[in-house]
Image: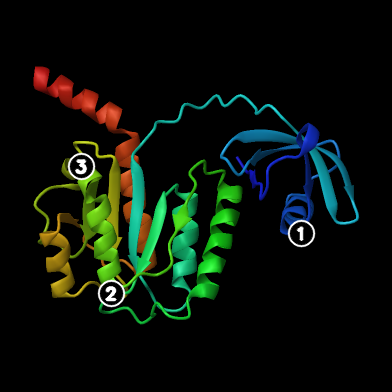
Amino acid sequence: MKQLILGSKPGRDNIVRLEGDEYRYLVRVRRIKTGEKFIAITPNGDETVVQVLSIYNGVLTGKCSKPFEIKAIYTKIPEIILFQAMPKSDKMDLIVRQAAEGGITEIVPFVSEFSVAKTNAEGQKFNRWKRIIKEARQQSGSKTETFVRRPLTKNELFEYWEIIKPDATGLLFHHEGLEKESLHGYLNIIPKVVVFAIGPEGGFSNAEVSYFTENGFKPFNIGDTILRTETAALYCAAAIKILLLERDSWELKQMNLNSV
């Protein structure tokens, strides 16, 4: 369900005044009219319903109230973090959008050996990625607050991995032949955090593959085709999330098989 992510908390009497990008999104994109209601997420993550009181001179005024009842039951899954080697041109924009729509918790771009893009002069792209995430969450209704980091060097990436490693399972998407277990097997014991690493157009170098695997990443591949980096990120994220979401059903099935 579409939602608006508010840039500031509601004011006195739970009144919000929306201008600029928020106004344009609601009035010109969503075609919201006076008297209608829409779902919004406050800066602290609370869900609210806003009823439009007026639309005048570039300002939408609304009143926040209790949220709708959410009838769907959402399964809580571990945080999912994407380590994405920087691709060419604007492919990262698509990767960021798809990751936000898919409920990825964190996107960590980094410069690998075969990356063309560099970490310098990335401020403008970083700000654009944050805008893309907001738009994607509003469009998709994702309840996950997706965070994107500024591009890291390989050394900075591995320093970050060392910090989160004790609570995480690291997965390395790479060519066939390195995997020791299936993706299902790797996720059989549910970790607190799942990290998966995707290479750039040229893939990871042998040295990078060795470093990842020597530092706890488990190699896996999906299918027998060579995927574009932007496709691989979406493909792997979907596979990981589906396995995590359905873990209760396949764990129950495994228990039944063991009891036969």
Left/right placement of residue 259 relative to residue 20 reads left
The mark that comes first in sequence, 3 or 1, is: 1
Residue at numbered disc 3: 184
Q: In the image, which disc is placed on residue 112?
A: 2
- Name the residue: 55% across, 24% down: 71
Of residue 1 and residue 159, the one placed in the foreground of this image is: 159
Cα gap from disc 2 to disc 1, whole angstroms: 38 Å
User: Which of label 3 and label 2 is nearer to you?
Assistant: 2
Cα gap from disc 3 to disc 1, whole angstroms: 46 Å
Left/right placement of residue 159 relative to residue 26 reads left
Cα gap from disc 3 to disc 2, whole angstroms: 27 Å
For the image, the number of numbered tags is 3
Characterize the local packing of mark 1: few (<14), some (14-19) or many (20 or more) Cα atoms within 10 angstroms. Answer: few
Point out residue 154 in the picture as x, y percentages from the top left corner: 27, 71
Left/right placement of residue 105 relative to residue 131 reads left
Q: In the image, which disc is placed on residue 20?
A: 1
Characterize the local packing of mark 2: few (<14), some (14-19) or many (20 or more) Cα atoms within 10 angstroms. Answer: many
